[in-house]
Image (tube, helix red, strand yellow):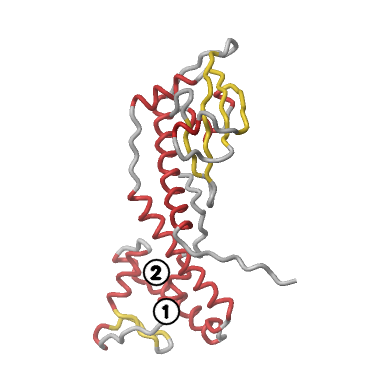
């Protein structure tokens, strides 16, 4: 899905495992200990969990031990070299925490998005195929519907199919004389007014994939909802950009 969304690079599972072993654990009872590595004890249930995590079976316990021993020895050596005290390591933990936090938030927000693409929406899009459209990008977003008709802006005439996807998706929801607002990355949004729709004499009819059009419209609805939400966050925030003193 194309969320303007911010593409996050998560540091990875290795960092999670490192964090897990850096912090002290509650010591297990002697009878529950499965293996001890330089005094660091691992409970039987920990070994079981580790085995399942990597897909090992009950008869592969030796491989679980090998994996556990190798990783623990590497962690202990890293701690002996005080890597965990280095600023670069602390920064990597901070980056992982922040990226994970943002990813979780975006995933939750995405799960709340609701789309409603109807057959009418698909038919409207199809009706524009093979048409020449004239539209105007308005200088400012109208406050009232009546204001849009006389608003100034930059006019364009083009074959509908040649337009950028975001423009096509917005225009296909309009009738001549109507305008729509599209939310862009960051704090940007703009309005397009559909001025006219005319047949194209040179257009060659092609097969139409309604399912693909529906998916495209649904993705666009989700993306626009997400961008609108991000814009609201910006509008409700107090943001000060300090200029460097000369």
- Quadrant where the image shows the N terminus: top left
Which corner quadrant of the image does residue 125 belong to?
top left
Q: Is residue 159 above or below residue 44?
A: above
Q: Is residue 40 left or right of residue 86?
A: left
Q: Which mark is residue 63?
A: 2
Q: Is residue 52 above or below residue 143?
A: below
The residue to which callout 1 is attached is: 21
Q: Is residue 34 left or right of residue 37?
A: left
For marks 2 and 1, the one nearer the N-term is: 1
How many numbered marks are there? 2
> Residue 113 in the image: x percent, y percent?
35, 46
Disc 1 residue crowd, few under 14, some 14–19, many 20+, Cα 10 Å = some
The residue positioned 45% from the left and 24% from the top of the image is: 175
The residue positioned 53% from the left and 33% from the top of the image is: 192
Considering the numbered disc 2 on the image, is that residue within a helix, a strand or a loop?
Answer: helix
Q: Is residue 162 above or below residue 27?
A: above
The residue positioned 57% from the left and 13% from the top of the image is: 200
Q: Is residue 48 left or right of residue 6?
A: left
> Residue 74 in the image: x percent, y percent?
50, 78
Q: Nearer the viewer, residue 111 or 232?
A: 232
The residue positioned 58% from the left and 80% from the top of the image is: 87
Disc 2 residue crowd, few under 14, some 14–19, many 20+, Cα 10 Å = few
- Quadrant where the image shows the C terminus: bottom right
* Whole-number angstrom distance, CA of label 2 to CA of label 1: 20 Å
Q: Is residue 139 above or below residue 35?
A: above
> Residue 201 in the image: x percent, y percent?
58, 10
Considering the numbered disc 1 on the image, is that residue within a helix, a strand or a loop?
Answer: helix
Which corner quadrant of the image does residue 136 belong to?
top right
Q: Nearer the viewer, residue 161 or 188?
A: 188
> Residue 132 in the image: x percent, y percent?
56, 19
Q: Nearer the viewer, residue 50 or 89?
A: 89
Q: Residue furthest right?
A: 246
């Amino acid at each position: 899905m194309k969320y303007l969304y911010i593409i996050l690079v998560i540091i990875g599972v290795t960092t999670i495992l490192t964090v897990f072993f850096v912090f002290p654990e509650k010591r297990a009872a002697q009878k529950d200990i499965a293996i001890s590595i330089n005094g660091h004890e691992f409970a039987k249930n920990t070994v079981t969990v580790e085995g399942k995590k990597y897909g090992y079976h009950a008869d592969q316990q030796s491989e679980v031990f090998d994996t556990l021993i190798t990783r623990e020895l590497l962690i202990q050596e890293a701690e002996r070299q005080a890597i965990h005290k280095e600023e670069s390591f602390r920064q990597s933990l901070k980056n992982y925490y922040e990226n994970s936090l943002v990813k979780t938030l975006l995933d939750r927000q995405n799960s709340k998005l609701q789309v409603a693409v109807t057959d009418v929406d698909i038919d409207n899009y199809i009706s524009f195929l093979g048409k020449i459209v004239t539209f105007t990008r308005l200088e400012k977003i109208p406050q009232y519907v009546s204001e849009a008709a006389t608003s100034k802006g930059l006019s364009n005439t083009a074959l509908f199919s040649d337009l950028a996807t975001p423009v096509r998706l917005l225009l296909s929801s309009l009738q001549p004389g109507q305008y729509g607002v599209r939310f862009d990355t960051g704090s940007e949004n703009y309005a397009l007014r559909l001025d006219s729709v005319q047949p194209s004499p040179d257009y060659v009819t092609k097969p139409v994939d309604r399912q693909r059009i529906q998916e495209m419209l649904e993705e666009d609805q989700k993306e626009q909802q997400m961008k609108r939400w991000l814009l609201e966050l910006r509008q409700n925030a107090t943001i000060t950009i300090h200029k460097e003193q000369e």
